């Protein structure tokens, strides 16, 4: 199993293509619950806009993946 380096939230300027993404927050691996709550709140704040965000995991080996 890969070791998690950190959890992050990225803001994207275009909902359709998830383009122009910028990391706006990062959390230690043990703060997954806090990261998820923060992500849900941030995502809700973007509901009526052209923008979007996603929650991701950065692994210690350099790989990353979108989880929400």
Image: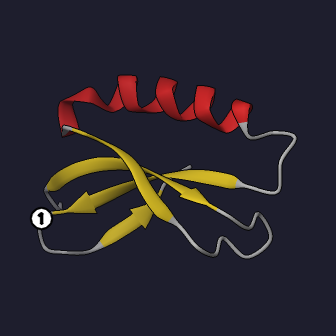
Mark 1, residue position: 60
| Residue at the image position 27 percent from the left and 60 percent from the top | 58
| Residue at the image position 66 percent from the left and 38 percent from the top | 43
Quick check: 36 above or below 17? above
Q: Quadrant location of residue 25?
A: top left
State the residue in front, 5 or 41: 41
Measured from the top left, where is residue 23 in percent x and y? 41, 57
Q: Residues within 10 Å of mark 1 (few under 14, many from 20)?
A: few
| Residue at the image position 67 percent from the left and 64 percent from the top | 13
| Residue at the image position 72 percent from the left and 31 percent from the top | 44
Give left or right: position of 5 versus 43.
Answer: left
State the residue in front, 16 or 65: 16
Q: Quadrant location of residue 11?
A: bottom right
Q: Tell me the element at label 1.
A: loop
Q: How many marks?
A: 1
Residue reaching furthest to the right: 48
Quadrant where the N terminus sits is bottom left
Measured from the top left, where is residue 17 in percent x and y? 73, 76
Measured from the top left, where is residue 31 in percent x and y? 26, 28
Give left or right: position of 59 versus 44.
Answer: left
State the residue in front, 63 or 45: 45
């Amino acid at each position: 199993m890969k070791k998690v380096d950190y959890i992050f939230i990225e803001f994207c300027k275009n909902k359709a293509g998830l383009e122009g993404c910028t990391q706006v927050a990062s959390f230690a691996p043990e703060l997954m619950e806090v990261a998820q709550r923060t992500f849900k709140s941030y995502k809700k704040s973007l509901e009526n806009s052209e923008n979007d965000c996603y929650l991701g995991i950065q692994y210690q080996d350099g790989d990353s993946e979108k989880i929400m």
